[in-house]
Amino acid sequence: MAYRHCIVWIDHFRATVIRFSCDGSAEVDICSDREAAQLHRKSGPQGSGHLGDDKEFFERVARELEAAPEILITGPGTAKVAFEHYLNDRYPKVDARVHGVQTLDHPSSGELLDYGRRRFKAIDQLLG
């Protein structure tokens, strides 16, 4: 089934991609191969205390979006913005179909789908 809309929830370790239209939806979960490690240290070499972006993880999520006509990116922290920059650099045709990047904490799949439906309804009304 072809779906018109796609909402992505992403953090540094997990992404949920939901494709949907009026009459159905399909969900894919993608996990980073990195372990969720805490990097803040009190001794030893000092760095930023943060993991760099997982480009392989971003690549797998980006490939899930290649056929999506309209995309909304959401998430709780900085990963959503880093992922949008990754799309801009590596997948400009996909990035051109992104209709927004929004902060969204940790919704259930149902809450994410409901949010996507509401947001795209508003976007469709503005565009149409």
Image (cartoon, helix red, strand yellow):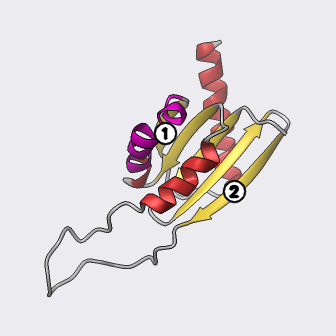
Taking 35 as reference, is 117 above or below it?
A: above
Q: Nearer the viewer, residue 88 or 75?
A: 88
Quadrant where the C terminus sits is: top right
Q: Residue at x 45, y 54 (%)?
A: 76
Q: Which residue is mark 1?
A: 91
Within-10-Å neighbours for mark 1: few <14, some 14–19, many 20+: some
Within-10-Å neighbours for mark 2: few <14, some 14–19, many 20+: few
Residue 30 covered by magenta stretch: no
Residue 86 covered by magenta stretch: yes
Tag nearer the camera, 2 or 1: 1
Quadrant where the N terminus sits is: top right
Which residue type carries mark 1? Answer: Tyr
Q: Residue at x 14, y 87 (%)?
A: 44
Q: Residue at x 71, y 43 (%)?
A: 19
Report the Cα–Cα distance between label 2 and label 1: 20 Å
Query: Which secondary structure class fits the magenta region best?
Result: helix
Q: Residue at x 61, y 24 (%)?
A: 122
Marks 2 and 1, the one that precedes in the sequence: 2
Residue 78 rendering spot, x and y as whole percentages: 37, 53
Using the rendered image of the protein, determine whether residue 10 is visible from the camera's viewpoint: no
Magenta extent: 81-96
Give the quadrant of residue 115. top right
Q: Which mark is residue 28?
A: 2
Residue 70 rendering spot, x and y as whole percentages: 62, 31
Please give left or right for residue 68 compared with residue 88 in the image.
right
